[in-house]
Amino acid sequence: MKPVADATPKVTKSEREWRDELTPAEYHVLREAGTEPAWTGEYVDTKTVGVYQCRACGAELFRSETKFDSHCGWPSFFSPLAEDRVILREDRSLGMVRTEVLCATCHSHLGHVFEGEGYPTPTDQRYCINSISLTLVSESDQG
């Protein structure tokens, strides 16, 4: 897994517009690369079938079929909907090297991806994503 270069976001808004559209907690995670506390997000244990969208712009990011129980305190996925749906970039913010996951459409912070942890998934990757960065559209709501 190699971080990819940032492209220009397809959805651009001023910081004022983002603040007006998002709650303070959503803004902190999505626009300031914050993290919600472990085990507090609404999708940690969700088994609902559907598509997870970016809460900031509505881009489809992950499918429920790739969600798995990692017992880490945040929703985990072994793969995004498609590789072009997310941007990966190096994150050295906590004194260690991690790979940050951004929405490719609006460049909002989603979480981080880890690999080589030994989870029995097809990719051996764990996209550890903040619930507050996502909106789940259930299969029944998709029509």
Image: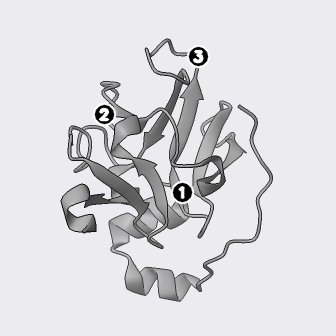
Residue 50: give x, y in percent of width and height.
30, 52
Residue 39: give x, y in percent of width and height.
24, 38
Mark 3, other Cα within 10 Å: few <14 / some 14–19 / many ≥20: few
CA gap between label 2 and label 3 equals: 18 Å
20 lies above or below 121: below
> What mark, if any, has residue 116 been given in the picture?
3
Residue 37: give x, y in percent of width and height.
31, 44
Q: Quadrant of the N terminus?
A: top right
CA gap between label 1 and label 3 equals: 22 Å
Mark sitting earlier along the chain (1/2): 2
Answer whether labels 1 and 3 touch (C-beta < 8 Å): no
Q: Which residue is mark 2?
A: 73
Label 2 secondary element: loop
Q: Quadrant of residue 3?
A: top right
Mark sitting earlier along the chain (2/3): 2
Label 1 secondary element: strand
Q: Quadrant of the C terminus?
A: bottom left
5 lies above or below 124: below
Q: Residue at x 34, y 65 (%)?
A: 25
Q: Which residue is mark 1?
A: 109
Q: Residue 58 or 33: which is nearer the viewer?
A: 58
Q: Residue 67 or 13: which is nearer the viewer?
A: 67
Q: Residue at x 46, y 61 (%)?
A: 60
Amino acid type assigned to the residue bearing label 1 in the image: His
Mark 2, other Cα within 10 Å: few <14 / some 14–19 / many ≥20: some
Q: Which tag is nearer the camera, tag 1 or tag 3?
A: 3
23 lies above or below 76: below
Amino acid type assigned to the residue bearing label 3 in the image: Gly
Q: Is residue 75 visible?
A: no
Residue farthest toward the front in the current orientation of the protein: 143
